């Protein structure tokens, strides 16, 4: 799957339960099963190895650190009772 810096992988391609997506400085996108932590010094998002999965290759981005997003329908607090 080839992506560019402005086009992240589609959430429809995300494995069930992998609720975060982020791009590293080198352009690689990863799905995360737990919320990743920013690793500015290495230009990567960090999480336990078993909690990350390659999602695609994009172009390197100068603002990679702004790429982390949560699955749109995912709510860690649970369903709303409105």
Image: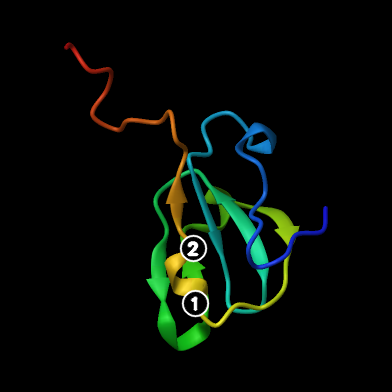
User: Would you call the spot at circle 1 few (<14 residues within 10 Å), some (14-19), or many (20 or more)?
Assistant: few
Q: Is residue 78 above or below residue 59?
A: above
User: Would you call the spot at circle 2 few (<14 residues within 10 Å), some (14-19), or many (20 or more)?
Assistant: some
In space, the residues marked 1 and 2 are separated at their CA atoms by 7 Å
Residue farthest to the bottom, as pictured: 41
In the image, is 76 to the left or to the right of 16? left
In the image, is 67 to the left or to the right of 74? right
Disc on res. 67: 2
Residue farthest to the left, as pictured: 82
- The image shows residue 59 at horizontal and vertical percentages of 72, 73
Identified at 69% across, 36% down, the residue is 13
- The image shows residue 41 at horizontal and vertical percentages of 44, 88
Q: Image quadrant of residue 37?
A: bottom left
Q: Is residue 27 above or below residue 31?
A: below
- Mark 1 vs 2: CB contact within 8 A: yes
Identified at 56% across, 58% down, the residue is 49
Work out whether residue 36 or residue 57 is closer to the camera in this orientation and state it.
57
Q: Secondary structure at mark 1?
A: loop
Q: Secondary structure at mark 2?
A: loop
- The image shows residue 71 at horizontal and vertical percentages of 47, 38
Where is mark 1, residue-wise? 63
In the image, is 54 to the left or to the right of 63? right
- The image shows residue 22 at horizontal and vertical percentages of 53, 59
Q: Is residue 10 above or below residue 45?
A: above
In the image, is 47 to the left or to the right of 31? left
Residue farthest to the right, as pictured: 1
Total numbered badges shown on the rendered structure:
2
Residue farthest to the front, as pictured: 6
Identified at 75% across, 59% down, the residue is 3
Disc on res. 33: none
Work out whether residue 7 or residue 1 is closer to the camera in this orientation and state it.
7
């Amino acid at each position: 799957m080839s992506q560019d810096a402005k086009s992240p992988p589609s959430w429809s391609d995300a494995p069930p339960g992998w609720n975060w997506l982020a791009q590293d400085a080198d352009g690689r996108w990863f799905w995360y099963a737990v919320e990743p932590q920013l690793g500015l010094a290495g230009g990567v998002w960090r999480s336990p190895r078993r909690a990350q999965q390659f999602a695609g290759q994009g172009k390197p981005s100068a603002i990679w650190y702004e790429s982390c997003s949560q699955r749109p329908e995912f709510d860690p607090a649970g369903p709303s009772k409105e």
